[in-house]
Image (cartoon, rainbow, N blue to C red):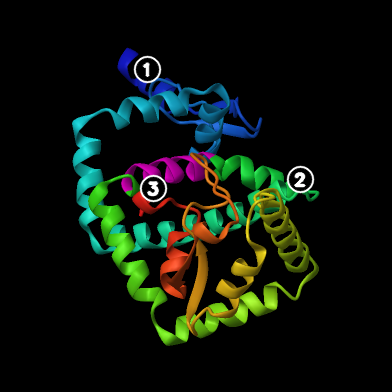
Amino acid sequence: MDNLFNNELIMKPIKKKCVYCNKKILDYSINKIKRFCSSYCCAEDYKKQGKRRLAIAKYNKTERFKQQQKKYSLSKKGIKGRIKRDKILWENLKLARKIKKLKLNKKKLNNKQIKHLERYEKYLISIKKQAKKYNSKPEVKERKKKNAKKYYTRPEVKERIKLYRKKFFSTPRGKALRKERTNRRRALKINAVPKWCNLEKIKEIYKNCPKGYHVDHIIPLNNPIVCGLHVENNLQYLTAKENTSKGNKLLYDR
């Protein structure tokens, strides 16, 4: 009789309220420990209390999780998912770079752009560090130098650069840059011309310059180690290619 009475009590449901959404529920469990109306409410309550994160962190340290992760990453679904995630991340990084450029140019950003930049700035910094580390390797430097030389000697690339330069120097910014450079060069020349120099000889050197050659300063007018003078003894003829590659370097620097 006692057993029958106990069984009846166990089978009889208890009216309760869901801990998360206060919805009325009937507890049919043996121990009468039901607290939620659904698995969704249970998960949300765990999220709210922070228990879910702790449970996931605990599970992620187990050996079973590591094996499952490895298995999933090698599966077709895992590979597809990784490619998709990488694509989305790359697009977001591109957008973050654009926003960063706008910020550097002191342009006003909206809240959406600020949040996006805050979210992906860590990625940009880590990518920059990795790239710096990789590009500092001597074999990478050598390979890049060879590839650049090969690329910039192509006629179509030369034509494209020529058109771009023409377009850029026709803009107000390009015009201002060109003026600044020419004025700086003129000022350097004026300061580098001593009283005892022979200006007629210098004019002759510039007049007699062969086609495809440039008049170059042996000791450059603007160099961090030593600055030369704009005199006849400091001038020489160099091919256009040699002169552009030399820049403001000294002869032993080449």
Classify mark 2: residues with Cα within 10 Å, few (<14), some (14-19) or many (20+).
Answer: few
Q: Which numbered disc flags the more N-terminal residue, 2 or 3?
A: 2
Is 75 positioned to the left or the right of 203 in the image?
left
Query: Would you place residue 67 above or below residue 101 in this image?
Result: above
Q: Is residue 242 positioned above or below 125 on the image?
A: below
Residue 140 forms part of the magenta stretch: no
Q: Amino acid at mark 2?
A: Asn
In the displayed structure image, the side of residue 115 where residue 129 appears, left or right: left
The residue that appears at 77% across and 49% down in the rendered structure is 109
- Highlighted range, magenta: 122-134
Q: Quadrant of the C terminus?
A: bottom left
Where, by quadrant of the figure, is residue 241 drawn?
A: bottom left
Q: Earlier in the sequence, mark 3 or mark 1?
A: 1
Above or below residue 94? Residue 133 is above
In space, the residues marked 3 and 1 are separated at their CA atoms by: 72 Å
Residue 33: percent from the left, percent from the top? Answer: 45, 21
Residue 107 image point, x, y percent: 78, 50
* Camera-side mark, 3 or 1: 3
Residue 145 position (above or below residue 124): below
Point 71% across, 47% down: residue? 103
Spatial distance from mark 2 to mark 3, Cα to Cα? 30 Å
As for residue 131 lying within the magenta part, the answer is yes
Q: Are marks 3 and 1 in contact (CB under 8 Å)?
A: no
The answer for how far apart the CA atoms under marks 1 and 2 are is 63 Å
Nearest to the observer: residue 230 or residue 32: 230
> Residue furthest toward the top?
2
Residue at image location 63% in from the left, 71% down from the top: 203
For residue 111, which numbered disc appears in the image? 2
Q: Which residue is mark 3?
A: 131
Label 1 CA crowd tier, 10 Å (few <14, some 14–19, many 20+): few
Mark 1, residue position: 6
In the rendered structure, the answer to whether residue 4 lies left or right of residue 51 reads left
